[in-house]
Amino acid sequence: MRRQLCDALVARAQRPDLVFLTGDLGFGALEPLRDVLGARFINAGIAEQNMVTVAAAMASDGLEPWTYTIAPFCYARAFEQIRNDVCLHGLPVRMLANGGGYGYGVMGATHHALEDYGILSTLPNLHIFVPAFDEDVAATVAAAGAIAGPAYIRLGRGEMPAGEVAPAYAPWRRLRGGTGPVIVAVGPMAGVAWAALAAEDVLQDADLWAVSELPLSLCPPPDAFIEAVRASRRLCVIEEHVAQGGLGHSLAAWCLERGLPVEGFRTLNAAGYPSGTYGSQGFHRRESGLDAPAIRSAALALAAA
């Protein structure tokens, strides 16, 4: 999504208050933005905590700062600064986090982001974006730029199945309708689930949704989703994130609190490192049961429940 991000920010760079700070990353992708912004493109170095604090100061002075680094260096290394300097003051700092989930593959656990939006959902005022497809990035940048408070944007690699066209970007989107199990996928997992379900004729009645904005307190499900769950009573949540703090647990509580009758419930999550080895993003998804065969199996089991 880096190319689409660069294009979206170049278009937005006509705003004289926009400032971009990078943690010594983005080379080979963000040069067009650097060329447009000039002195407003700042390499903050490998100093993510300082970068967030500087961005907070800029925001408090009326500027529009966007920070950029890989996801774990954003939320894990600079959590104190995000909490104290940005969120507690509700400052409009937009934090771009590349490589969500297992995105950095063989770089290993230090470079993976498996608990980011669960942790960040505990902070006040913070709006979280997880675009599902590359085509969503421009709309995500526009949406994040329009809110009055802070935003965390988890970027990854989001592809639609061949021949499919997604509806226009929305926090919650129905990718395909049906009267069977309701399947919810967060961010780029939506494309994986879409392809998995399309390849299985028996799952043509699955009702597939893509979720791109969190937490539920800021981005609750639409009425159409609620009615689908009420009618189906079967729900599966797929996310490249650990179970604790993920959308699955949050959505289960949300449904229970509102008396939604869910009789069959399943979550598919990042399982960490079951084999104790590292590999590509696809390798880790397979180990976690987040690949197409595992998704089909879970959906079939839920459909038969």
Image (cartoon, rainbow, N blue to C red):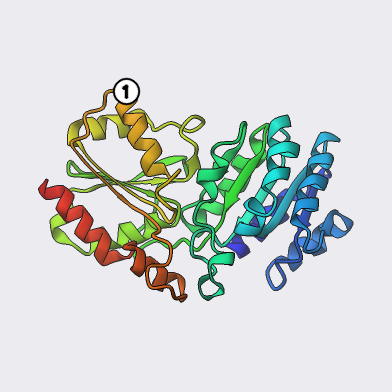
Q: Is residue 44 left or right of residue 213?
A: right
Residue at the far left: name it: 304
Q: Is residue 174 left or right of residue 234?
A: right
> Is disc 1 placed on a helix, strand or loop?
loop
Image quadrant containing the C terminus: top left
Residue 236 visible in image:
yes
- Seen in the picture, residue 222 relative to 186 is either above or below; the reply is above
At label 1, counting other C-alpha atoms closer than 10 Å, the crowd grade (few under 14, some 14-19, many 20 or more) is few
- Seen in the picture, residue 227 relative to 211 is either above or below; the reply is above
Viewer-nearest residue: 134 or 111 = 111
Q: Amino acid at mark 1?
A: Arg
Residue 129 visible in image:
no
| Residue located at (70% from left, 31% from top) | 88
| Residue located at (27% from left, 59% from top) | 295
The spot of residue 136 in percent (x, y) is: 51, 52
Q: Which residue is mark 1?
A: 258
- Seen in the picture, residue 280 relative to 265 is either above or below; the reply is below
The spot of residue 76 in percent (x, y) is: 63, 53
